[in-house]
Amino acid sequence: MIYITRRERFSAAHRMFREDWTDEKNQDLYGNCSNPNWHGHNYELFVTVKGSINPETGYLVNLKDLSRLLQNAVIEKMDHKNLNIEVDFLKGKILTSENIAIAIWHELNFGIQSLGAELHCVKIIETENNYVEYFGN
Ligand code: NI
């Protein structure tokens, strides 16, 4: 089994909040990330896939194909967007890095199988001090 990771970046606005809570209660839990007027992050997305090397090419997957998949399935939909209101696959979610990572996993899983690999990890870095990894369960 061999693993390979592709990094992509996107910048986006979001707000973490529950609609059924007051602004004050949201502020208590989510702090500045609950600002009703939104705020932004420069996110980094690391997607790790695993599988066997194709003996003909020497590749697990062609990174150009993996990058194209990430761009089409995720980055173009999220980059310079408001994640709460403009991204179909994030609608109705509390937009923590945890939930964003899980949603991205589901967007990518089938496409990565189509490339002949298996999705291993979706990692989201929201700030330089924190990151989240999702391994599919
Ligand atoms: Ni935030």
Image: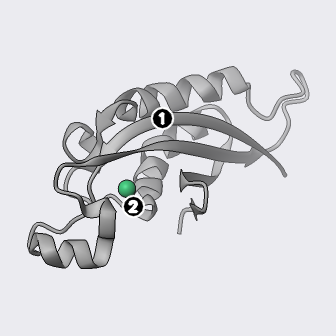
Q: Nearer the viewer, mark 2 or mark 1?
A: 1
Q: Give the SS element for disc 2.
A: helix
Determine the residue positioned at 50% across, 26% down.
71
Residue 6 position within the rendered picture, expressed as x and y whole percent measured from the top left? 68, 37
* Picture quadrant of ligand 1: bottom left
Q: Where, by quadrant of the figure, is residue 12 drawn?
A: top left
The disc label shown at residue 108, or none: none
Q: Is residue 19 left or right of residue 62?
A: left
Q: Give the SS element for disc 1.
A: strand
* Amino acid on which disc 1 is placed: Phe
Residue 49 position within the rendered picture, expressed as x and y whole percent measured from the top left? 69, 45
As drawn, 73 above or below 1 = above
* Amino acid on which disc 2 is placed: Asn
The residue nearer to you, when weighing 30 against 70, is 30
Exactly how many numbered labels are in the figure? Answer: 2
The disc label shown at residue 10, or none: 1
Residue 83 position within the rendered picture, expressed as x and y whole percent measured from the top left? 29, 44
As drawn, 89 above or below 25 = above
Determine the residue positioned at 42% across, 43% down.
107
Label 2: which residue? Answer: 99
Query: Is the residue marked by circle 1 packed among few (<14), some (14-19), or many (20+) residues within 10 Å?
Result: some
* Sequence-first disc among 2 and 1: 1
Residue 134 in view, yes or no: no
Query: Is the residue marked by circle 2 packed among few (<14), some (14-19), or many (20+) residues within 10 Å?
Result: some
Q: Is residue 48 left or right of residue 56?
A: left
Confirm or deny contact between disc 2 and disc 1 (CB under 8 A). Answer: no
